[in-house]
Image: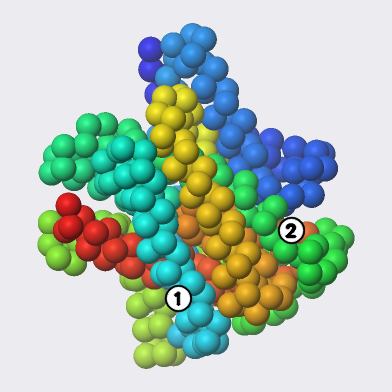
Amino acid sequence: MNINVDIFGTIAIAVAVLFIGYFLVNKISILKQYNIPEPVVGGLIAAAVTFVLFKQFNLTVNFNANIQQSFMLMFFTSVGLSASLLKLKEGGKSLLLFMVCVVIYVLLQNAVGISLATALDLNPLIGLIAGSVTLTGGHGTAGAWGSIFEENYGIKGAIVLGMASATFGLVIGGMMGGPVAKFLIRRYQLAEEIEPSAARMQAPPSAETAPFEYPEKTRLITADDAVKTIGMFALCIVFANFMTGVAKGQWFELPTFVWALGCGVFLRNTLEYVFKIELFDRCIDVFGNASLALFLAIALMSLQLWLLADLAGPLVIILIVQTVFLALYLFFVTFRVMGKNYDAAVLCAGQCGVNLGATPTAIANIQAVTNTYGPSHKAFLIIPLTGAFFVDIVNAVVIQTITKFF
């Protein structure tokens, strides 16, 4: 039996899930100690409840997918609208170095997956599915490529396989980032824990703030500001949906959220540098952070954990090895390349989301770490630009190139 929850019911449950996450993280020391994001905590509890309903009562709870997609598009639009060319230039060498680290890891991630699949006597493309297709690409890429693998390469159940792998990545990516950063920070004595009240007090002026850097900071917003910002969000999302239809099946086909982000970047910099119109960053930040929290909550509470229970043993082995390999890569490569400092540790937390879960997970990871140890302007500048735009283009090229050999 299916229980279909409408848009308003989905939002109401997502808000309740977020409050549960906030409450538990503040009350359970180990969750706060290891910087587990609140939406991950609340979302996993909701997913566990739906798992029990499915197993014990044969009830499948289906939350509204359209509102989840809308919140995702709003989040990526906010990334684009916050991407001033001045901030992009500010990233400089660090942004380039981190992009190189991510690109190299995408290639290695697929090499590990394909090698293990071959060693376990599986189709090598299953290793690709358990590589950057799902772990770096997430559920959207898994769904898009799953149908191609089923129709063109004869891999039965590729969509379910992909969704299960992406689910694993989303959960582990959200749980792994905080502990990895904490380990690096403590091992190298990079920072001390700060009081929550102190974290809220030290926010700089908005002109110096990267997107999503201070989600708890009070921002004064008028109704006019909100209306103008909603208008820009709507324009970007309309353009994204239009371009998705136009580009379908073409060489320039891209996921809808990439078009939304790109339109946001264009709109921001056109208004700012051509028409000299100053955008209200505080309002963009508020909408972006709210969309991020709600998207993560809905995404996690919508997880069908029984798909993970049905995974074959060899696939579980591949995914576990991928997790361990990322942890080693962060410790021996990313952390050292990025300078072995506090910013490098926070970036490692973000890369857990970028290469195992999704960009919203990456943002939540670094927010959780900086709430405990203090700000990292560099991480909030680099992670959204890399995870939301750059890595998806690189991943699409890598997947397309590898599949030509099979």
Q: Where is residue 382 shown, x and y percent of the image?
A: 54, 74
1 vs 184, left or right, is: left
Residue 325 is marked as none
Residue found at x 41% / y 36%: 315
Q: Nearer the viewer, residue 94 or 189?
A: 189
The amino acid on which the numbered mark 1 sits, given as a three-letter code, is Val
Q: Is residue 405 above or below residue 100?
A: above
- Confirm whether residue 363 shows in the render: no
User: Which numbered circle lies on residue 100?
Assistant: 1
Secondary structure under tag 2 reads helix
Name the residue at 58% across, 29% down. 46
Q: How many other residues sit within 10 Å of disc 1, few (<14), some (14-19) or many (≥20)?
A: some
The image shows residue 58, relative to residue 211, as above or below, that is above
- Give the amino acid type for the residue marked by disc 2 in the picture: Phe
295 or 329: nearer the viewer? 329
Left or right of residue 396, residue 62 in this image? right
- Give the labeled residue for mark 2: 183
How far across and down, in percent of the image, does residue 95 sit? 51, 80
- Dot 2, crowdedness within 10 Å: few (<14), some or many (≥20)? some
Question: Image point 79% across, 42% down: which residue?
Answer: 30
Where does residue 132 sit, x and y in percent of width and height?
38, 54
Q: Tag 1's secondary structure?
A: helix
Give the distance between the C-alpha atoms of the residues marked 2 and 1, in whole angstroms.
23 Å
